[in-house]
Amino acid sequence: MSLYTSDNPVFASFSFYAALLGAKTLLMALLTARQRLSKMAFANPEDAKMNKGGKIKTDDDVERVRRAHLNDLENILPFLTIAFVYVGTGPSLGCAKFLFRLFTAARFMHTLVYAVFVIPQPARALAFFGGMMANLYMIYAIVTTYASAF
Amino acid sequence: MSLYTSDNPVFASFSFYAALLGAKTLLMALLTARQRLSKMAFANPEDAKMNKGGKIKTDDDVERVRRAHLNDLENILPFLTIAFVYVGTGPSLGCAKFLFRLFTAARFMHTLVYAVFVIPQPARALAFFGGMMANLYMIYAIVTTYASAF
Amino acid sequence: MSLYTSDNPVFASFSFYAALLGAKTLLMALLTARQRLSKMAFANPEDAKMNKGGKIKTDDDVERVRRAHLNDLENILPFLTIAFVYVGTGPSLGCAKFLFRLFTAARFMHTLVYAVFVIPQPARALAFFGGMMANLYMIYAIVTTYASAF
């Protein structure tokens, strides 16, 4: 019997949080665009030309948002597969939901303190490790479940 | 009953376009290599050494291809999970196929106008938002389907 | 009947190697942190402030690890979806396991020769193409299986 059906509340929960995290990652592009427009700092001549006063230059605030975006690719994208595979190990709904919520909250927090309000460390480090812990816990559960499939 | 079987034409369609988009993303590496070799502009001393006349330097055309590649990671990789989860909401084949094709066409177009022929804006913006719209529509469908799994 | 169940040894094998590769990608962040701390080279003022003697600067060894990390995003993340879809085409366990192991070995090797021991070319090129071949073979199998779903 497949665990990957909308009848399985763990898979339903994964689906919901995966969509939320997908949206969050995609919308980083708008945060970058907002910074590029407010600083008139672009990466391509055709973009600078489209905006009056636009220049090709590197700007600290733009780079900060881009680093936050890259950090999402490095953490959220692996999560999407790790959490999916974790659903197949048949975890309890309570445990799975806790991990999905912890990871989601940690990653939203990461972007807030990194690229929106810029709060001193260890704010970002805590958000980063919150997400990392959720990922590593699921990886541990998967590897022990499927160890014989090595 | 699982929707994730090759008997489900929506999943078959997802599988086909996921493979196409995976290939497209992977092959960006060859586009970068082509530019690096034609400009003899490398990122690592061991690469410069391997190619007679190679230097470690940053080149505008190489960077352009690398930005197109990064943009694929930012958009195609989230799509792969979003579209997969969307298949589980049981969409009609017509609607799903339309979205998968729209997204695929938009992303191929994005690379063509960004890094192959370099066409002035708003060509790239249109391709970008075509793909983004397909992603956001699927996210909306997932979140409303699974809202109670919050 | 769904192929995405823990009873299917091909899916079990996919789950195992997906978790391993997810862990590998995530842990690149620690390799970067180690380099940043040993060179005291940071990207953000709040990070430099947290570490006595820390400066905001670009360092060759830090950038090398970051390129290895980005290369993982470019190759391992597409693999995670490609291999998942490939499981649905019903491959033999022997063939699937060979591809998953080849890819996993190639990517671990890639990081070792790129960012840990720095071995001259063509070491990195061989590791890169080993992984690429596994991905392209699976893409070919998917596209031919689902060609009618175009």
Image (cartoon, coloured by chain):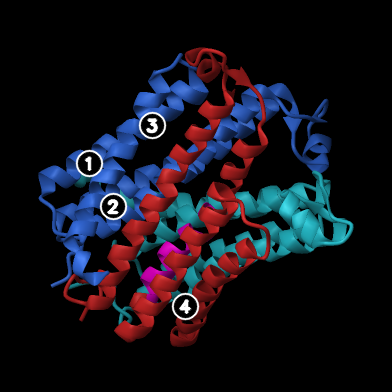
Chain colours: A blue, B cyan, C red
Residue at (53, 66) in percent of width and height: B22
Q: Do marks 2 and 4 share a subunit?
A: no
Q: Secondary structure at mark 3?
A: helix
Residue at (47, 78) in percent of width and height: C138
The subunit letter for the residue under badge 2 reads A
How many other residues sit within 10 Å of disc 1, few (<14), some (14-19) or many (≥20)? many
Asked if disc 2 and disc 1 are in contact, CB closer than 8 Å, the reply is yes
The subunit letter for the residue under badge 3 reads A
Q: Relative to B7, is A88 on the left or the right?
A: left
Which residue is the site of mark 4? C138
Q: Which mark is residue A128?
A: 3
Q: Relative to B146, is B30 on the left or the right?
A: right
How many other residues sit within 10 Å of disc 3, few (<14), some (14-19) or many (≥20)? many
The rendered magenta stretch, by its main secondary structure, is classed as helix
Report, in whole angstroms, how far the alpha carbon at label 2 lies from the one at label 1: 9 Å
Q: Which mark is residue A83?
A: 2
Estimate the x, y position of residue B47 in percent, counting from the top left.
74, 56
Q: Please, what is the three-letter code of the amino acid marked with disc 2?
A: Ala
Instruction: Tell me which corner region of the image, top left, top right, bottom left or bottom right, holds residue C63.
Output: top right
Q: Please, what is the three-letter code of the amino acid marked with disc 4?
A: Met
In magenta, the rendered stretch is C73-86
Quadrant the N terminus of chain C occupies: bottom left
Q: Which mark is residue A99?
A: 1
